[in-house]
Image (tube, rainbow, N blue to C red):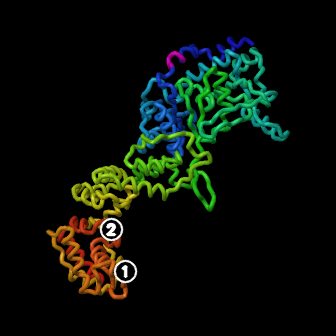
Amino acid sequence: MDYEKLAELLFSDIKTIPEEYENKYAPRSLPKGARVTRFAPSPTGYLHIGGLFSALISKLTADVSGGSFYLRIEDTDKKREVEDGVSGIVKGLSDFGIDVTEGVTGLDSEVGDYGPYTQSKRVDIYKCFAKDLVRRGLAYPCFCTPKELSNMREEQEKDEITSGYYGEFAKCRNLSFEEISKNISAGIPYAIRLRSPGTEDGKVTFDDLIKGKIEMPENIMDIVLLKTDGIPTYHFAHCIDDHLMRTSCVVRGDEWISSVPIHIQLFRVCGFKVPKYAHIAPIMKLDDGGKRKLSKRKDPEAAVEYYSKSGYPKESVLEYLFTLANSNFEDWRRANQDALLSDFPFSLKKMSVSGALFDLQKLNDVSKNVISFMSADEVLEKTLAWAKEYNTSFYELLVADETKSREILNIDRKKAKPRKDIAKWSEVLEYVSYFFNEIYEADSSALPENINRTDAVEILKAYNWNATDDKDEWFQRVKDLCEPFGFTPNVKEYKENPDAFKGHVGDVSTVIRVAMTSRTNTPDLYSIMQILGEDEIKNRIKAAIAAWEKK
């Protein structure tokens, strides 16, 4: 076989040679030990939380080594591609703090010297390298129809032998140039297959940066490199892309481990250096006492947009993902409460081999803690940004008086141990609702059972709000209400002799709290009343008295 002649027959329109691309995409100028990583999703659906996690791990791997991280879009499967798939990926990454400084930045935009970063724009590059493999006798055209391939697999399964296109079953592997030329002249569609150098007893060994040493059978299949439409398969395209974009460490889900023998073989037959691999175990979820992967179909929290719509701050989601990434992160955070996430010494070797367990409640706890340390300005800004997109009526309510909104969100915020009431911006509406008559609904049933309604009415009738009181003076007025109605102003005294009193000062203040907010647990009551103002305080006391007297 004259392979040079065959290569020209198959790829007469391809004039570029691999060396030209090697020169165009020169090795990156990076420090020794720096790793180049990528996130390379397909725009065939929404961005999964597992995808966000994978992107984060890829970026951290590059950052801690002083390397580079880029975004590549693998869009060769046009049949499954969804509208706005690319935009959704870019937005999902950006919304949660993974800013792309190289690669695809939008539907028709990208930055960087190693593009195009979208596979559908790189077809001639793949054909160039496929032509080179044909020229070197390492690839060939296959004219087998889908029906022929299906019949072959059925026969293999019937005979209980390994199914696939290899060895004696690779019908087109040894076609003559004349036979190939005749088929092409007849217009018979063909794919380009690898002439696999693998043997049935061959082994491939690699050191996974997360899972350790792995040994697997060598690939013996003559896999498809270019499909009949000239579009590359994932296997071939990613090999060419990772080499030319100078990827040194491939971080991806461990469902790809089974493909590693194919990928290592492709790198080697193409004459490329094999990158390091780091395979991430999937994020798991407890279900009926067992564990399973987060499901796109079953679990709304599997979609990254779920967190955007719910209003989780990107800082909270990232903080939580760090707890899944490295087992020592939480200890580090306790010792470094004010440190940036970028200061954390992330290590692939400290990742879970079996898969981290996703816990939505823990995310909420992490997020409450993160938000509790934000300033009122920051909370208001982020709440407004969320509400403007997802709850316009709430947005308009907040911006109508931003000074008041800021004062509300500042209550109990500047404390050594700030309150932790809010896990996501969608919860702010309920948290502040009693400050706004437009949305506040008084609930007369909120009074605790241990407080007699008759006593509550008398307490409110006797209570006297004075707008000029400071906090100590205000609290003294509450204490002064205790003894006349059988309560003690001393909590310790009540605990020592509970039968001697109806309750303590906390119960009296609860009566006022419920009248103001319809809640028994709120931030600082004095601050709440300062914001409500004298007229509203009187109106709410009057309404509470009327409601409790009816009971």
Q: Position of residue 352 (x, y in %)?
A: 58, 46
Which secondary structure, mark 2?
Answer: loop
Can residue 76 be seen in this snapshot? Answer: yes
Q: Position of residue 163 (x, y in %)?
A: 77, 36
Can residue 295 be seen in this snapshot? Answer: no
State left or right for residue 297 relative to residue 318.
right
Name the mark nearer the viewer: 2 or 1: 1
Which secondary structure, mark 1?
Answer: helix
Residue 2 to residue 173: above or below: above
Residue at the spot 52% in from the left edge and 32% down from the top edge:
37
For the record, the magenta segment spans: 22-26
Q: CA distance from mark 2 to mark 1?
A: 23 Å
Q: Quadrant of the image for the C terminus? A: bottom left
Q: Which residue is mark 1?
A: 495
Residue 248 to residue 313: above or below: above
Q: Quadrant of the image for the N terminus? A: top right
